[in-house]
Image: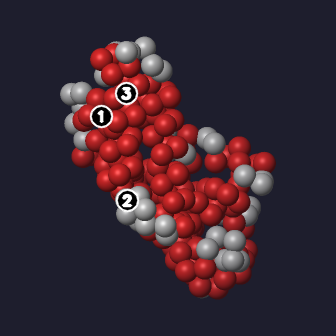
Amino acid sequence: MSKQQEKSQQTRHELEAAAIRLFGQKGFLETSIAEITSSAGYSKGSFYRHWESKGELFLQIIEDKLKSYREQRDGQHPKARDLDEAMGAIWDFLETIIDDNDWSRIFLEFTMHATRNKALRQALNQGAYRLSNELFASLVGEHVDSGYPPEKIGALNTALFEGFLIHSALGTGVLNKTDVRRAALLLARSNALKSNAE
């Protein structure tokens, strides 16, 4: 890597770090590109050499964050022996995201923002930016003996997780991680196992 490439990569990382910090403090919508560049000590031109918009920057941050979570998960979990272990692996992974309070709130805010922007919505639905229903399905798939589609179990985990993030962001305090994890396991068992599906 040349000195110029190293400098460009350093600039990008510093701008991302400033954005994450400001998004955590003020939220995605309330943070401007000017604030990001000023906080990182760069010009707006430096920002636009890397991204076309604040939304594009946030997609990069999501991709990097989910990649980091996935690497943690992949290094920690051996192949599951049964459905309970597979669900445990999924929820251990999801809880690392839940425990990152600032990040989960920012992610929710951006997701809602993206629903009103066709380009961001389409990008956000791509695998690099989403929790992987397919990956969750592959983790539970070999333990499903009822004929229920594993993809639906994967999608149900994502729906429960995202619903819990909203619930937590509202601060109702009625449910906790253990409640949702238990509900996800019971739902998976009731659909995936022939003995429970009958």
Mark linked to residue 190: 3
Query: What is the x, y in percent for residue 169?
Result: 52, 66
Number of other residues with Cα within 10 Å of mark 1, as a class: few under 14, some 14 to 19, many 20 or more: many
Give the vertical position of 99 relative to 127 (above or below).
below
What amino acid type should be assigned to the residue bearing mark 2?
Asn
Badge 3 crowding class, 10 Å Cα cut-off, few under 14, some 14 to 19, many 20 or more, is some
Instruction: Point out the tag, 1 or 2, that comes first from the N-terminus.
Output: 1
Amino acid identity at mark 3: Ser
Residue at 43% x, 62% y: name it: 174
Q: Is residue 48 left or right of residue 16?
A: right
- Distance, label 3 to label 2, CA atoms, is 21 Å
Q: Quadrant of residue 86?
A: top left
Q: Position of residue 193 (x, y in %)?
A: 33, 21
The residue at which mark 2 appears reads as 176
Q: Disc 1 or disc 2, which is closer to the eye?
A: 2
How far apart marks 1 and 2 lie (CA) works out to: 21 Å
Earlier in the chain: of badge 3 and badge 2, it is 2
Q: Which residue corresponds to mark 1?
A: 86
Q: Who is closer to the viewer here, 159 or 125?
A: 159
Tag of residue 94 = none
Mark 2 neighbour density, 10 Å: few (under 14) some (14–19) many (20 or more): few
Where does residue 77 sit, x and y in percent of width and height?
Answer: 25, 41
Quadrant of the image occupied by residue 48: bottom right
Q: Position of residue 83 (x, y in %)?
A: 29, 29
Instruction: Tell me which label, 1 or 3, sits earlier in the chain.
Output: 1
**Residue 155 can be seen, yes or no:** yes
Say what secondary structure mark 2 lies in.
loop
Q: Quadrant of the C terminus?
A: top left
| Residue type indicated by callout 1 | Ala
Q: Residue at x 71, y 43 (%)?
A: 122
Q: Tell me whether the residue at label 3 lies in contact with that at label 2, contact meaning CB atoms closer than 8 angstroms.
A: no
2 vs 123, nearest the viewer:
123
